Structure formats: C-alpha cells, structure tokens
C-alpha cells in the first residue's frame, strides 16, 4: 500500500505551516506555554504579523489586489476607534505595554490580522483535507480529556494552582485562605472543564470547540454515522464544560440540518427524536463513569447566576448615560464597580458592555461589522451549500448575549471561515467552468 503525497513546493510552505498551526493549536498552545511560558494567543499573533508581511509581498510581486470585504473595512474602522480610545483614556497602560507587545497582544488587533489572512490567502485543498482528519481526532481527544477531568480535574489543567495539592485540597485551601482568586481558578474550582483547550483561554472550549464541530458536520462528504459520532463527541465536551452558553451553542449548531431542510416540521421531529436518544445515551454513560448528574443540574443548570444578567441591565441603565457617545474607552468606571456591589465582576451582557465601553459610535460600528460578516457568510453558504462557517459565526454572535467577547481571534473560528471561503471559491469555479463549456458548444 503506497501513501500518496502531492508534489510539495516550498512556495506554499508558509500557507501549509499556518494551516498546521491552526489544526494543531491545542497542542501548540500546550507546548508554547509549558516550554516558553508565553500565552499561545500572543505567539499566534506574532506568527500572523510575519505571515501578513509575507502575503503583502506576494500580493505586490504578483500584482494582485488586497481583498477587503465590506465587513473587514467596517471592522478596521472599529479597530482604529477602539485602540485610539484606549490610548486616550489610559495612555500610561499603553506606555507600560509598549508598542511591540500591543501589536501582538491586543485582541481587537489580532482579530483584524486573522480576518485579513483568511480573506487574502488561498490554502491548498490537499492540506485542508488532511486538516479535517486532524480536527476529527482533536474532537475525539477533547471528549476523552473531558471525561477524564470528571475524576481528575487536574488532568491537562493549566498549571496555575498550588502544587502538590489534590482538587479537594485546593478547594479547601482557597476557601480557608479567602484569597482573591483569578477567574480561571474560580471557574476551575466550581467544576468547569476546559478539555484540551485549557492552555488557550477560558472561552476556547466553547468558541473553538463549537466552531470545529460546526465545520465538521457541515462537510457534505461526511456520512450520517460520522456526523452522529461528532455530535456525541461535541455533546460530551459541551455539557461537561458546565457552561450554559456552550450547551446552547452546541444545540444551535447541532440543529443546523433542521433549519436547512425543506420540510421543517419533519426536520424538527427528527432532531427531537435523535436528540432525546443521544441525550439518554450520554446520561447513562455519564452515570456509569460516576458523573454527579443531580449536582450538575442543581448547581449549574439551575444556578442563580442568571441574576447577574438582570443586574447588567440595571447597571447599564445607570452608567451608560454618563458617556453615551464615545463610551469609557474600554475601562470600568468607579460608579459601575460600586453599582455591581460585588454581585458580579462586570456587566454580564456582552452587547451592553460593548456600548458601555465604546459608546454609540463604537457599538454601532461593531454591530455593523458583525451583521455584515454574517450576511456575507450566509450568502456564500447559499452558493456553496456549506453552512459550517455561518453557524460557527452565528454561535459566536450569540455569546455576547451572556458574555463579553469582542475578539474573533480563535483558531476554530478562523478555520471555519477558511473552509467557508474554500467551498465558495470551489463552487464559483465549477459554475464558471460549466458556463465556459456551454459557450464553447
């Protein structure tokens, strides 16, 4: 049996390297953090800066045009507005960070880098096919690690805890000492599981994990068994994460076949039946391995943390009128902290916090960017019949109903858009070839 490998040109080495970096990012994140102590997102940001320079040189040498879709232009304006606002409000923080670090660590800037690369790079089809297999394996590993973390919460957990203590001892340690723990530690101690995404950031398990899930189940060459397998794997990761927003986004992405089917009633009935069957199997499996299902329902699904969302509207109504046009420049005012009164760490509705931070100008710009991006991705999906990118982006848009996350600089999201662009270009080429053949006849 011979292994087929295409003729490899060094000319595509940067593109292949970038793809492999994204496909293997959980592993890269682990290695870069444990080896160099550097945030994986920052390392990816540095690589993107170098890659952008390379792509610009290629575009100039080949006399090509830089691709700037409307959504990216709108976002570029938002980037300038947000960064300038941050500098004006807190210039000392900018000076302390330094220009170089800001260029590879500012999440708003990093999003622009990622989207610029995605729109201005054509990636080899062979390596995209390889990547699909890698992502399938990573989803499987993610589910396995999530299950292991039920019994051993310290397994593959980012090493920021007191060494030598068990999970139970850590809980007792932080409770007895009354230390102000970080958000990562608080989430860890209350039962959140980040699976293989632990070394990236706190939201990665939900944003990257769901985007990869959306990417995989939307590929038309995947059979029903494979799709069902991916649904089970992603369901395990999502529900064991203990985050309700991740569970909601899982259901949104998993139901994409319902909204795309011609017979919606039949599609909904099938989704309910299959969903009930999968949920039953997952429940039985989790019970067998010792997962505390009753505690999960009581402490997570039925917890009173939703009250912080109602508080967010109340606080926003008090603080927004102070700076309605320009916002606070990305900083929390004393009045906001006072009104929260320790009941929450922030305004826990992302779109409200967006307008609080950047005012009507910044808020409208960002909403305009996200809306234009969704519309463009939807139109592309209508042509290619590949909906993985649209549903991944739609799931991200849903996040800010409960969380605050403006950055799209996530490897799963970038891959979902890369695949959306790839299938769109492929379909357009096929249509053009058919039209050209008809003309010849």
Image: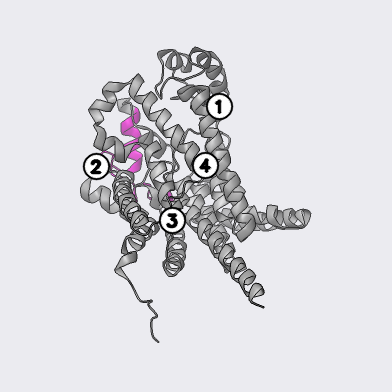
Residue on which the image places disc 3: 142
Residue on which the image places disc 2: 163
Instruction: Give yes or no for contact between labels 1 and 2 (Cβ–Cβ under 8 Å).
Output: no
The answer to whether one can see residue 3 in this image is yes
Asked if the magenta segment contains residue 160, the reply would be yes
Which residue is depicted at the point 43% across and 64% down? 131
Instruction: Give yes or no for contact between labels 1 and 4 (Cβ–Cβ under 8 Å).
Output: no
Residue on which the image places disc 4: 71
Mark 2 or mark 3, which is nearer the start of the sequence? 3
Q: What stretch is highlighted in magenta?
A: 149-175
Q: Which quadrant does the C terminus fall into?
A: bottom right
Q: In this view, does 331 lie to the left or right of 371?
A: left
Determine crowd level at label 1: few under 14, some 14-19, many 20+ residues with C-alpha closer than 10 A: some
Which residue is depicted at the point 43% across and 52% down? 65
Determine crowd level at label 2: few under 14, some 14-19, many 20+ residues with C-alpha closer than 10 A: few
Mark 3 or mark 4, which is nearer the start of the sequence? 4
Vertical side of 310 occupied by 437: above or below: below
Mark 4 or mark 1, which is nearer the start of the sequence? 4
Q: Is mark 3 on a helix, strand or loop?
A: helix
Asked if the magenta segment contains residue 112, the reply would be no
Label 2 and label 4: CA atoms lie apart by 46 Å
Label 1 and label 4: CA atoms lie apart by 29 Å
Vertical side of 408 occupied by 268: above or below: below
Determine crowd level at label 3: few under 14, some 14-19, many 20+ residues with C-alpha closer than 10 A: many
Q: Is residue 310 left or right of residue 276?
A: left
> Mark 1 or 2, which is nearer the eye?
1
């Amino acid at each position: 049996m011979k292994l087929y490998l295409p003729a490899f040109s060094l000319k595509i080495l940067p593109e292949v390297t970038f793809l492999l970096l994204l496909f293997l990012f959980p592993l890269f994140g682990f290695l870069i953090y444990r080896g160099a102590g550097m945030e994986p997102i920052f390392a990816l940001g540095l690589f993107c800066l170098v890659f952008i320079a390379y792509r610009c040189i290629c575009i100039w040498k080949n006399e090509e045009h830089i691709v700037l879709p409307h959504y990216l232009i709108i976002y570029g304006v938002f980037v300038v507005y947000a960064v300038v606002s941050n500098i004006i409000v807190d210039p000392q923080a900018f000076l302390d960070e330094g220009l170089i670090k800001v260029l590879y660590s500012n999440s708003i800037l990093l999003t622009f880098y990622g989207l610029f690369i995605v729109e201005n790079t054509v990636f080899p089809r062979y390596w995209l096919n390889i990547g699909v297999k890698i992502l399938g394996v990573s989803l499987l590993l993610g589910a396995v690690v999530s299950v292991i973390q039920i019994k051993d919460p310290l397994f593959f957990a980012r090493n920021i805890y007191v060494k030598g203590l068990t999970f139970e001892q850590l809980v007792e340690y932080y409770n007895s000492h009354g230390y102000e723990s970080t958000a990562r530690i608080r989430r860890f101690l209350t039962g959140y599981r980040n699976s293989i995404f632990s070394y990236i950031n706190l939201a990665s398990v939900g944003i990257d994990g769901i985007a990869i899930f959306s990417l995989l189940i939307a590929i038309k060459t995947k059979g029903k068994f494979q799709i069902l397998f991916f649904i089970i794997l992603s369901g395990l990761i999502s529900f064991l994460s203990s985050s309700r927003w991740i569970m909601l986004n899982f259901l949104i992405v998993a139901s994409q076949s319902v909204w795309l089917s011609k017979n919606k009633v039949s599609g909904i009935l099938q989704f309910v039946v299959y969903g009930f069957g999968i949920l039953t199997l997952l429940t039985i499996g989790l019970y067998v391995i010792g997962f505390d299902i009753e505690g999960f329902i009581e402490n997570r699904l039925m917890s009173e943390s939703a009250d912080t969302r109602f508080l967010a509207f109340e606080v926003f109504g008090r603080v927004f009128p102070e700076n309605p046009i320009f916002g606070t420049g990305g900083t929390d005012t004393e009045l906001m902290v006072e009104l929260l009164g320790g009941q929450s760490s922030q305004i826990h509705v992302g779109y409200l916090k967006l307008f609080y931070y950047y005012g009507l100008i910044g808020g409208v710009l960002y909403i305009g960017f996200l809306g234009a991006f969704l519309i463009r991705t939807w139109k592309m999906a209508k042509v290619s019949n590949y909906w993985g990118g649209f549903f991944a982006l739609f799931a991200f848009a849903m996040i800010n109903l409960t969380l605050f996350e403006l950055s799209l600089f996530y490897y799963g999201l970038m891959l979902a858009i890369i695949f959306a662009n790839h299938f769109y270009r492929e379909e357009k080429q096929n249509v053009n070839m058919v039209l050209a053949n008809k003309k010849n006849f």
